[in-house]
Image: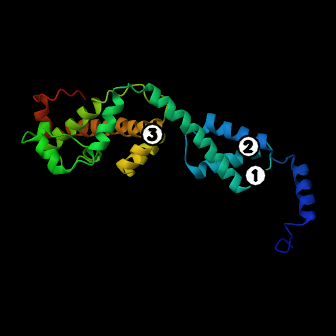
Amino acid sequence: MFAQYDWLSRTTTYHRTQIREFFGFRENTVLDAEEMIDWLYKGILLHDHNYERLVKAVYQRFRDLKIEPPTPDRIERLINTAISQFEEHFFQATLKKLPAGSLPKMDTLVNSSEIPDEINEAQGGSNSDEIILTFNDLKADLGKPGVESALKEVRKLRTIRSLELPDNLFNGIPLKILYKYRQRSVTEYPRELRRHPEPVRYTLLSAFFYLRAMEITDSLIELAMRRHPALLILKNSALGIRI
């Protein structure tokens, strides 16, 4: 009987009405969709951007409110609209917190990722402390522990701290949300980053630098806890880094 049911007939419309009345549900409206977007924007997206979990949350919310949910396509659209609103506010708020002097420094680092290695070496000379770190250098992992690796990690940390990002830049923003935007910054080509509007570009880059500084600091602390010989040189170095 179920397989033979005509889902497009007038009987279907009548049956759906009966089912809604029996369970105390009602049809959704445009206002319901707007309120769902606002609910996602204010209460959910600050903590989670996983699409599958957002879909489940939306269906559960409609169920709790006893509203028949819209079609899957409409649910996808309202989730995307809520994410767009969240990002627009988040990007603008981040840009307002950034010092004006930090912006050209970030642009310089992004542009430096396109500097050929031979030019960088020529500018740095034989002194490794003077080598200009590029955006790609900052993305690179620690590698094999050693004196040179430790010193390079310190130079990375100095470079990021020279951007003077505010300590409260991402207060209240969970790390898993920041990692989403950090991932975008490392997977896009420099020319793609430069094409973004300023609020988007500087938020993506700030998320990367903010989290990268934490990772580098953790790497140096791990070396210190292991009493690795590479850290002995840091005690008497002139790099001026506090971990």
Q: Which mark is residue 178?
A: 3
Residue sitting at 27 percent across and 47 percent down?
113
Are circles 2 and 1 on residues that touch, CB within 8 Å?
A: yes
What kind of residue is marked 2? Ala
Which quadrant of the view contains residue 217? Answer: top left
How far apart in space, not on screen, are marks 3 and 1 (Cα)? Answer: 31 Å
How far apart in space, not on screen, are marks 3 and 2 (Cα)? Answer: 27 Å
Which quadrant of the view contains residue 11? Answer: bottom right
Q: Is residue 234 left or right of residue 10?
A: left
In which quadrant will I find the N terminus? Answer: bottom right
Q: Which mark is residue 129?
A: none
Q: Under tag 3, what secondary structure?
A: helix
Which quadrant of the view contains residue 10? Answer: bottom right
Q: Is residue 153 left or right of residue 47?
A: left
Nearest to the observer: residue 77 or residue 64:
77
Q: Is tag 3's residue or tag 2's residue first in the polypeptide sequence?
A: 2
At label 3, counting other C-alpha atoms closer than 10 Å, the crowd grade (few under 14, some 14-19, many 20 or more) is some
At label 1, counting other C-alpha atoms closer than 10 Å, the crowd grade (few under 14, some 14-19, many 20 or more) is some
Pointer 1 residue: 70
* Residue 54 visible somewhere in the drawing: yes
In which quadrant will I find the C terminus? Answer: top left
Q: Under tag 1, what secondary structure?
A: loop
Pointer 2 residue: 33
